[in-house]
Image (cartoon, coloured by chain):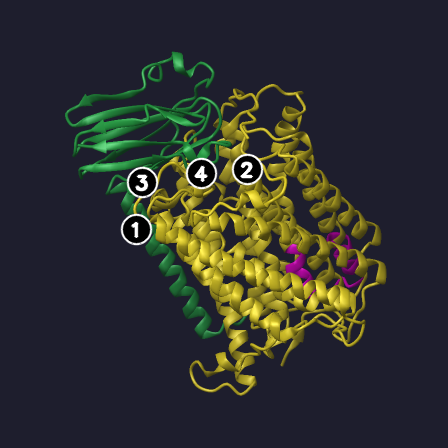
Amino acid sequence: MSAPLVHDPSGFRLPDPQRRALQWSMFIAIVAMFAGVAHGFAQALSYAGINILQSFPGLRSYYQGLTVHGVTNALVLTFAFSNGFLPMLTARALSRPLNTFLVRATFGAMAAGVALAGYAMLANKASVLYTFYAPLQAHWTFYLGLVLVVVSTWLAALNMFLTLGAWRKEHKSERIPLLAYISVVSYAMWFLASLPVAVSILGFLLPWSLGLLERVDPLLNRTLFWFTAHAIVYAWLLPAYVSWYALIPKQVGGKLVSDALTRGAFIMFLLLSIPTGFHHQYTDPGISTTMKAFHALLTFGVFYPSLATAFSVTACLEMGGRARGGKGLLGWITKLPWGDPSVSAQLLAMLTFVLGGITGLINASYTMNQVVHNTAWIPGHFHMTVGSAVYLTIIGVTYWAVPYLTGKKLWAPKLAVAQSWIYAIGLLIFARGLISGGLQGMPRRTFIAEATYEAAGWKLAGALTGIGGTTMTVGMLIFFLIMAMTWLTVKKDGAPVDIPVSESLTTPATTGWERKMDNIWVWVIIAVALILVAYGPFFLTYSVNLVSPGFKLY
Amino acid sequence: MKVHVYEKAFLWVGAALLVAIGGTLTYTTLAMGIHLPGHVMQVDPAQVRTLPPFDNPGVRQVGENRYEAVILGSAWQFQPNEIRVPVGAEVTFVATSTDVLHGFVIERTRLNMMLIPGQVAKNSYTFTERGEHLIICHEYCGAGHHVMYGKVIVE
């Protein structure tokens, strides 16, 4: 028996103006990716002791490039992609169009935000990295640009909420189709999570950069940043999980294992992604160790739905592999459709993410965090999460979504399969370099090629980082080639006409407590309550210390 | 809601693993005395050089085999940038920043703190072997970030 994850499995086509706007959102994502990759290459070589910065016209410093790398990859690519992907899936799941004005406004806010922040970064007026810790001060256009990027995600979220609300009015007794549910919950979580950083920028940093506020409190703004920025990691990751839960089963010939457990996992992410931010501040002064320990506990909690995801996704893959003739304990793995570039990229995303998850547990481990905090270990870790699970899933989704949105078949699909392997292998070498460097004290966010100090073991670690980073860059150049050729040279013909949506093995219950899972607002209120418990004591007892004027040391 | 027996087993094993890790971490901090920096006090970074203990940065003995190292971070140096302590000494580092965020990690130890203007960071470490350790600024602090370092010499 199986049940659809969407309202109408027979198919639904988005209106053309909406398709075009979503397509342009994808385009911004890929352009951002290109800028991010170019600078990433220079940074990987820096670890190997090679300085190629002079080959970048107009670049004033390593840290200017590093700012571009972080902002474009972590903030622009991820959200430009999700702003297109999640509303598109919501519309498909409910078989009803989005609000065209909001689709366009989402794109407009994102484009304006990228233009403003891009100007500030290119003019070297915002070399403050993507974390923009005060009191390093950026030009106001940088902060305003980031605000607009966040506003674009709010508009996308609003569009999804309105579309879901309208659907529910007409289908009062029905369960929310699973695909819509997990897409909406992902952005509901992000909407909540984005509020603290909005307070930080609008309440402090933007007026401060305009001269309206003389001094800010560095710890307060750092805390507001991490209040948002652990959850931001889940805002990047959940769209990938949406693909793994709801689309990948269809692509490999399996089925989603459990409707209720999938909804449950996303509820856990909604509840636990946000009240965990102090685990990024274990080594900060000014925050009590009791609060840090409490956040450590909740961080282990948010690992749990990822464990459940690991089981569900592997089970659906096994089902698919066996349906395709796989035998024995592991024989099903080789029978998976590795020749489909969308699948191979996402299978490699999952495999590399195992290491990302394990290293993440180590980061979260309270006392042990002191061994790795702010060393090269950290970028080693997050390149195996956002740089693999998220990046490779975005790549894998793009391999069907760009053909779906443009009506053009993917150019050179075999090359696309090779692309994902080259990137993933490069990534593992790269991360191995950074991880070992970090364990030997090598700092992150540092121009190692020109550093005036060095310790034992860094040479080998840096060389591996450089070799791996170069391999990743080759993989990404192939990706950009495939995208450019698909967009520019392929004729409109033979592209997939529908999104690959899976079916579920279980039907969502229409009676009993499971229906309560669909009351998303109730879960949002519980999430807020948990956030108040986790952050309330800090903010209630903290005395604001407005001591820092702006510094422009770049 | 039916949950497959394998999935149940997997989730229970996962939960047990997380509880075991949590227990180990509790042991490291409560029984082994490994602590994180916590709340100490607030200061004004513009005035901090004139106020004790930061008006006199450096190492001083505060008890039998116990030392206090007072260190200021500013773009792009530590003051003092080299400290000497005897082997076996338990050193309490008290540090802050006079300008932007800086990092303070002593390589090949677990001593790792953020220096945040307005806040005093404090943590202790016992050096059990002779040798040199780099003190590295591991938070981006501007164009000269990669030249900001110091040394602990254990003699």
Q: Which chain is green?
A: B
What separation in Å lies between label 2 and label 3 (alpha carbons)? 26 Å
What separation in Å lies between label 4 and label 3 (alpha carbons)? 19 Å
Residue beneath disc 2:
A61
Q: Which mark is residue A281?
A: 4
Q: Which mark is residue A30?
A: none
Alpha-carbon neighbours of circle 2 within 10 Å: few (<14), some, or many (≥20)? some
Q: Amino acid at mark 2?
A: Ser
For label 3, the SS is: loop
Which stretch appears magenta? Answer: A160-185
Judge depth for marks 3 and 1 and give the one in front: 3
Secondary structure mainly formed by the magenta segment: helix
Image point (53%, 27%), residue name = A553
Q: Which chain is yellow?
A: A
Judge depth for marks 2 and 3 and give the one in front: 2
Task: For the residues labelled 2 and 3, say whether their Cβ atoms are less than 8 Å apart.
Answer: no
Residue beneath disc 3:
B107
Q: Position of residue A92 (x, y in %)?
A: 75, 65
